[in-house]
């Protein structure tokens, strides 16, 4: 073989080898490009899923499942889980573990020993576990706020405790979940060592996806809380409508009297109530009451008291006996920190006499047509403070006689304790002064004048207590 031929052959071999290596490199580049494009497409699909989930207002459980399963698909993992912070922020609690999720936490040695022959017992122990938020592999990620790529979970510092066991050959990616600067929990994706370790590119994808997941979870939580608030407000409005049915829809037409009553709740549900109950022999019971507290609890107690009183006073014509029975019923069911101040006025349309029982309610100012004021304040114990003996001993019947031109003002402490912007109380003195000026013009003018003067006094200060006013005018 000549030297020239040998040289040519070497060039051909070199060119062939170079082309083959170049072809191989191109195939590898193409393969890597396709892999990256595939991962990007999976990521886009994952983000698209999150967008749809938020638009459709998924339940929290469904969103957790879709996030974990979606991330498992994105990085081709075996399984994963979301652990969320407990309400007190002390623990991480599993909210969703995928079907093939490997063990991600260490278990006490005694639990492992007991469940050695029962794989289901291990799974149950994991699902029921709660992890201190600042301990273990998951806690360390939450505390640091930095995602971690853990090539071999069993060699993580968290599993070097002699009382905790972890033996699986698992690699994992863990990231904290946060929204608006507040920690929500952690998300974990794992695969066994039968598959390649997670690559740096997969870890970057996981970090990005975790950030978006935290945003989605935070938004979902806000939407859920807003929906719950709207539902609660709707339920309260319905409750208010029901409660308004329990209040008189019109003032009574009683010969010789003009009566006007109003109720203005501080919140949607009122703890005040008033009532007009027709009795036998031309008599009418006028009731005013104030339940301690405000809101739903006070409203429920108000409804219970109204029902019991109506039942007892129709069965028992003596108002003191009727209230004694109501007190026994209420005392058995009332909370220790609650009670009801109540007064019943039995009006007789024949002679102008009024028989009343005051169960711890505010004294009532009585305007006489000679322009003087008397206070009606018989003794009596509020309902719900005693099971009966003290109530019966302290509470008495009191008789009043009204003449033409006399007016009686009934009210709850929402009137006298109303505050202005300087936090001064409206007070009984101011109320009586307004009452005295308005009384010569009758019941309607009394109620209108008190509400007008009260509104002027409190100005922009928010009403903090229910306000009930009833004016009784003798004609």
Image (tube, rainbow, N blue to C red):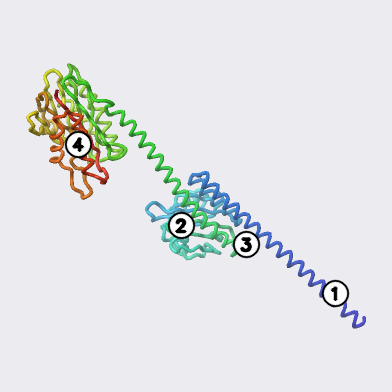
Q: Which of the two marks, 3 or 4, is nearer to us in this view?
A: 4
Q: Residue at x 13, y 17 (%)?
A: 350
Residue density around tag 3, few if under 14, some if 14–19, many if 20 or more, within 10 Å: few
- Mark 1–mark 3 Cα distance, whole angstroms, equals 39 Å
- Mark 4–mark 2 Cα distance, whole angstroms, equals 53 Å
Depth check: give the residue in front, 185 or 397: 397
Report if the CB atoms under discs 4 and 1 are less than 8 Å apart: no
Residue density around tag 4, few if under 14, some if 14–19, many if 20 or more, within 10 Å: many
- Dot 1 falls on a residue whose secondary structure is helix
- Which image quarter: residue 10? bottom right
Q: Position of residue 468 (x, y in %)?
A: 22, 34
Residue matched to label 3:
196
Q: Position of residue 146 (x, y in %)?
A: 48, 64
- Which of the labelled discs sits on residue 412, or is there none? none
Among numbered discs 4 and 1, the one appearing first in the sequence: 1
Q: Quadrant of the N terminus?
A: bottom right
- Dot 4 falls on a residue whose secondary structure is helix
- Which of the labelled discs sits on residue 178, or is there none? 2
Q: Residue at x 43, y 59 (%)?
A: 181
- Mark 4–mark 1 Cα distance, whole angstroms, equals 111 Å
Q: Which of the two marks, 3 or 2, is nearer to us in this view?
A: 2
- Mark 1–mark 2 Cα distance, whole angstroms, equals 61 Å
Residue matched to label 4:
450
Residue matched to label 1:
12
- Which image quarter: residue 193? bottom right
Residue density around tag 2, few if under 14, some if 14–19, many if 20 or more, within 10 Å: many
Report if the CB atoms under discs 4 and 2 are less than 8 Å apart: no
């Amino acid at each position: 073989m000549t030297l020239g031929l040998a040289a040519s052959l070497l060039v051909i071999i070199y060119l062939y080898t170079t082309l083959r290596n170049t072809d191989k490199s191109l195939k590898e580049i193409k393969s890597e490009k396709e892999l990256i494009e595939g991962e990007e497409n999976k990521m886009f699909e994952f983000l698209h899923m999150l967008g749809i989930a938020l638009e459709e207002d998924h339940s929290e459980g469904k969103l957790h499942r879709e996030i974990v399963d979606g991330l498992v698909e994105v990085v081709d993992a075996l399984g994963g889980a979301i652990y969320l912070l407990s309400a007190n922020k002390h623990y991480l609690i599993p909210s969703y573990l995928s079907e093939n999720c490997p063990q991600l936490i260490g278990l006490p040695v005694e639990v492992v020993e007991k469940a050695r022959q029962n794989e289901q017992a291990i799974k149950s122990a994991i699902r029921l576990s709660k992890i201190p938020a600042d301990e273990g592999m998951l806690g360390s990620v939450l505390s640091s706020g930095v995602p971690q790529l853990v090539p071999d979970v069993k060699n993580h510092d968290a599993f070097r405790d002699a009382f905790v066991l972890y033996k699986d050959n698992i690699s994992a990616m863990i990231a904290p979940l946060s929204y608006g600067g507040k920690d929500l929990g952690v998300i974990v994706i794992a695969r066994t060592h039968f598959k390649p370790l997670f690559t740096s590119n997969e870890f970057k994808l996981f970090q990005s996806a975790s950030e978006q997941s935290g945003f989605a979870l935070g938004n979902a939580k806000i939407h859920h809380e807003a929906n719950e608030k709207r539902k609660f407000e709707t339920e309260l409005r319905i409750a208010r409508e029901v409660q308004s049915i329990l209040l008189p829809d019109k003032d009574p037409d009683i010969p010789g009297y003009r009566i006007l009553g109003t109720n203005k709740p501080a919140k949607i549900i009122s703890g005040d109530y008033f009532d007009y109950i027709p009795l036998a022999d031309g008599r009418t019971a006028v009731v005013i009451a104030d339940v301690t507290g405000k809101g739903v609890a006070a409203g429920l107690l108000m409804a219970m008291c109204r029902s019991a009183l109506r039942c007892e006073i129709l069965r028992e014509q003596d108002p003191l006996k009727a209230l004694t029975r109501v007190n026994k019923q209420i005392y058995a069911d009332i909370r220790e920190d609650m009670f009801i101040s109540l007064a019943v006025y039995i009006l007789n349309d024949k002679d102008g006499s009024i028989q009343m029982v005051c169960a711890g309610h505010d004294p009532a100012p009585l305007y006489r047509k000679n322009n003087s004021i008397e206070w009606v304040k018989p003794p009596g114990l509020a309902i719900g403070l005693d099971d009966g003996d003290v109530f019966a001993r302290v509470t008495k019947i009191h008789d009043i006689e009204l003449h033409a031109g006399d007016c009686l003002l009934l009210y709850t402490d929402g009137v006298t304790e109303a505050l202005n912007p300087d936090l001064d109380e409206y007070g009984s003195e101011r109320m009586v002064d307004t009452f005295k000026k308005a009384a010569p013009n009758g019941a309607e003018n009394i109620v209108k004048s008190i509400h007008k003067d009260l509104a002027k006094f409190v100005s922009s200060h928010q009403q903090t207590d229910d306000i009930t006013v009833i004016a009784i005018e003798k004609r």
